[in-house]
Amino acid sequence: MAPDALTTLAQRYATVQSDVAAAAAEAGRDPSSITTIVVTKFHPAALVRELAAIGAHDVGENRHQEAAAKAAETADLGLRWHFIGQLQSNKAAAVLDYASVIHSVDRASLVDALARAERDVDVFLQLNLTDDPNRGGVAPQQLESLAERVLGIPRLRLRGLMAVAPVQSSARAAFACVREQSAELQRLAPEASALSMGMSGDFREAILEGATHLRIGSAITGNRQAPG
Ligand SMILES: *Cc1c(COP(=O)(O)O)cnc(C)c1O
């Protein structure tokens, strides 16, 4: 039998919460400084509803169409939606209809599209930790100019950096690199100290390197179906 069949969503959520608390203790950090965003991609709106019932109110999605449908179906729950996937500029306005935080801002054209927002938006700049420009994220060399562009737009609140650890290398080393880039960013934008990093397989390492926003999917939701 698959392990998921033996545990409930509430049990997995509780296990992740205690693992987060343990890693925070190991790092000498207050666990309340860490937000767990539950990534609900490929799961139905019913799961989002179940999550809300057990106290999980920050949810993340990486595809606009799927996210928009789920957000509409659960609009009564007052959840905070985080958009964490690659975002086309021509979808930016539509995403802002439900998402209040965008974790994947990685280029000037997207900043300009978000600038037309009619409400305040929290923004993370996604850092590309690989040499592959197709991976999404801004190269470290371009981070400062992108940050300046965001800072020039009053409705966009620059929160910090987001990254996905590359599969080939040590997650801990990758997250340490993000922390160093964050220190650079904070010289320009002292408020932009948040770090969106850490997924099901590497959130302990992320917490040890200062993560403030974890994006956790399968460890909480169970195995998801591959996209059809
Ligand atoms: C799917 C996804 C996650 C969560 O991944 P898990 O390994 O299921 O925890 C986190 N961040 C991004 C950008 C994702 O697309």
Image (cartoon, rainbow, N blue to C red):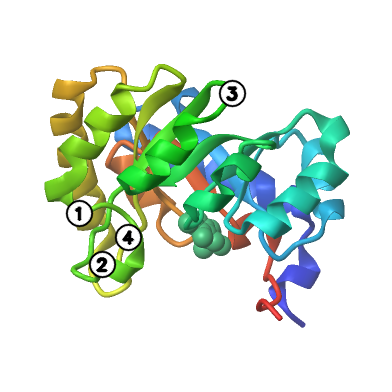
Give me the residue at 70% from left, 52% from top: 67
* Residue at mark 1: 139
Q: Is residue 16 above or below residue 34?
A: below
From the viewer's perspective, is 134 left or right of 218? left
Judge the density around disc 2: few (<14), some (14-19), many (≥20) Cα neighbours within 10 Å: few
Check disc 1 and report its element: helix, strand or loop.
loop
Measure the alpha-carbon separation of dots 3 and 2.
31 Å
Q: Which mark is residue 118?
A: 3
Measure the alpha-carbon separation of dots 2 and 4.
15 Å
Specify which label sits upstream in the sequence, 2 or 1: 2
Specify which label sits upstream in the sequence, 2 or 4: 2
The answer to whether residue 193 shows anywhere in this view is no
Quarter of the rendering containing residue 118: top right
From the viewer's perspective, is 15 left or right of 85? right
* Residue at mark 2: 133
Quarter of the rendering containing residue 115: top left
Eye-nearest disc, 3 or 1: 3
* Residue at mark 4: 165
Q: Quadrant of the C terminus?
A: bottom right
Eye-nearest disc, 2 or 4: 2
Give me the residue at 33% from left, 51% from top: 205
